[in-house]
Amino acid sequence: MMRRINWAENPKEKWSGLICHSTVSRQKSRTEDGRREALIFPPSTTCYPKMRPPQVFLEFTTHLIIKALDINRSTIAFLLHLRRRIYARQSSMGGTDVVKPPELDNLLKLDGYLWNYQHEICRRYGVFLDYSKKIEECGGWEAFTTAYREYGILMMRDNSIRCLEWAPGAEGLSLVGDFNGWNTESHPYKKLEYGKWELIIPADENGKCAIAHGSILKIAVKKNNVFRFKLSPWAHYVTRPIETTVYHMPFYNPPESERYHFKYPKPPKSHSLRIYEAHVGISSCEAKINTYRNFADDVIPRIKKQGYNTIQLMAVMEHVYYASFGYQVTSFFAPSSRYGTPEDLKYLVDKAHETGILILLDVVHSHASKNVEDGLNEWDEYGFDGFRFDGVTSMLYHSHGIADALDGGYNMYFGLNVDTDSLVYLMLANSFLHRKFLNIVTIAEEVSGMPALCRPVEEGGQGFDYRLAMALPDMWIKLLKHFSDENWDICNLVFTLENRRYAEKNIAYAESHDQALVGDKTIAFWLMDKEMYDFMSETTQLTPIIERGIALHKMIRLITYGLGGEAWLNFIGNEFGHPEWLDFPRFGNNESFHYCRRQWNLVDDELLRYKYLNNFDRAMNELEAKHLFLSRGPAYTSWKHQDDKVIAFERAGLLFVFNFHTWKSFSDYKIGIEISGEYALALNSDDPEFGGFNRLDKNQHYFTFSEGYAGRRNHLCVYIPCRVAIVLEKVEK
């Protein structure tokens, strides 16, 4: 018989699992080859729901392996020993303390499924507290997070230069460069404790800095009596000569007259983020790499006019390969010199702040260059208002999310594949950032659906403000690629748009830079493809493909905007349906910039139909700015009809109605609505300003009837043409 352990009375056996035989197997049951069948029983979640360990899935896995392979009992004992050692090591990461987060009950109220995993949540929080304690004991958070002020090559107030590096495996370090003829013997570092190396270069006899601004430097690292030249991982500015792929490290010490000083305060944090994802280099019409200053002067005014209040800036950290989109980072503390100097970047940020726009930095943790001669900021110096953490999924799991099913099962989220160190790092980063900078915004690019990722650390979460709703663009590309819109599954479409963790804010988007890259297509190109080349002019006939493309482009973006999350993101150029794809200059395209730019001339030309998509994008942002529906809680979907292809939902007092039918328009279509009263058109995708056919009277008002419908207290009737979306707002008297 199976022996049940009372865990409260036998704490040592709490997580050990059970080896037993059934009554039948004790008496007479043996396998065909004579071995007795062995079973591993994990702790009962029914009897002990509060004490379920995070390694339960390992118990089941071990059981399945034993059953499948018919392993003998000595091997079983070894597997059990190995399992206990793994869990013991996992628990020891933060000491033996399992600490309940102070606000854990709030988290459990939001998601009852987490009840069975609270032991693991508490263990993770204990590791977080353990690391926090160690940081406090070793100088505190301020010292821990400002190492860039100590390490690297730094100017001191007396014009001396202090060089400090951490290289515990080196035999010696020297500073070499133009200033000393690249002599590895003239400026050696002195070895300090804990693997640190220091060099002080005093000011010259005139009291001036001994190394000129812009002079090329490198660190000569000695190993096995051989010097290898490297960049300092703390370099603030690096450049790439035209003739080589190896970066140089200029000594960055511009005169006061060339330094930029901020003039404008940071804008207040917005509760409704309307994010414009941008890349400085591709932002010009010309076939070139654009600059920080040109972006500030030419592109930021466009972004402001469109109604966006946040810019998410990609590819700012220095990267060796331009075509990597900024993901092969070589110097984590240096802004890319392709676009200008650090002072130029400050000018860009200040220009955004002048217009009331927040600036978020795309932070790349999970990609880096392998070039041994390239080196990791003082990003607070540049005045950024927040961070988008790239590739969080690959950080969260030991497998980096590769070849994982990522089925969203809770055992996956709380099993041994989760990388505790990475997860706790994210907790530490968010905890510090939100305490240090009260208005900061942090965003996670995370696809697995990790619970509590966007809940406060005090609840046992990881502390992000938002996560990207990465399933949404995948859904749209799948529909456009594999299904005609007559065959779209309306119910599944709505389910995907609404399917997100409760009380964890998501950033909705229909497409981003991922879909724009060569090898994929933007939504506009999926819809209209080659006809965009010949029939986007007002002087040409409106073809059925262009008509359908313009209509669906507007509808897809609006329903994603209104139903898909608590913030909105658009990639540069997609607001007006930028044609073609994004292809950086590379060997395979003869280093061409033809597809690596944004053709603003298309939207500026009044004779082209791109203006209609641009106008609609601006109208969506203006509607959100007026009603702030992104921050007013999730929408209530009252109607989704597969045959009619009609969807209706309410959010923040607005009524959104979509008719995706390819040819059928509906008169007096009955729509349920909660709040009675008089309503008017707030947005109409069929308006001529947006390339529509003006089938709705913009001055028409809609009155509710007291008869309830579709689960709502009232209803109204609308005329909704095919491939049209409308938004109604209540008329205030």
Image (cartoon, grey):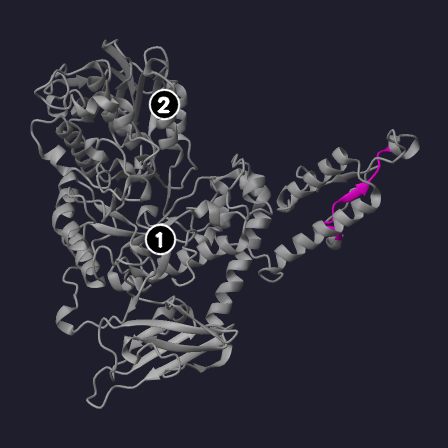
Give, as a three-letter code, the residue at label 1: Val
Q: Secondary structure at mark 2?
A: helix
Q: Is residue 720 visible?
A: no
Instruction: From this view, report whether residue 151 is shown above or below residue 325.
Output: below
Residue 369 lies in the magenta-colored region: no
Residue 193: image location, x then y, percent: 49, 80
Residue at 19 percent across and 27 percent down: it is 729
Residue in view at x 59 percent, y 60 percent = 93
Amino acid bearing label 2: Lys
Element on which disc 1 rests: strand
Highlighted magenta segment, given as a residue range: 13-23
The answer for how far apart the CA atoms under marks 1 and 2 are is 31 Å
The residue to which callout 1 is attached is 363
Q: Position of residue 645 (x, y in %)?
A: 32, 14
Nearest the viewer among 383 and 287 is 287
x and y, in percent, of residue 595 in the image = 24, 38
Give the number of the disc on residue 481: 2
Residue 394 placement (x, y as % from top left) = 47, 46
**288 vs 27, nearest the viewer:** 288
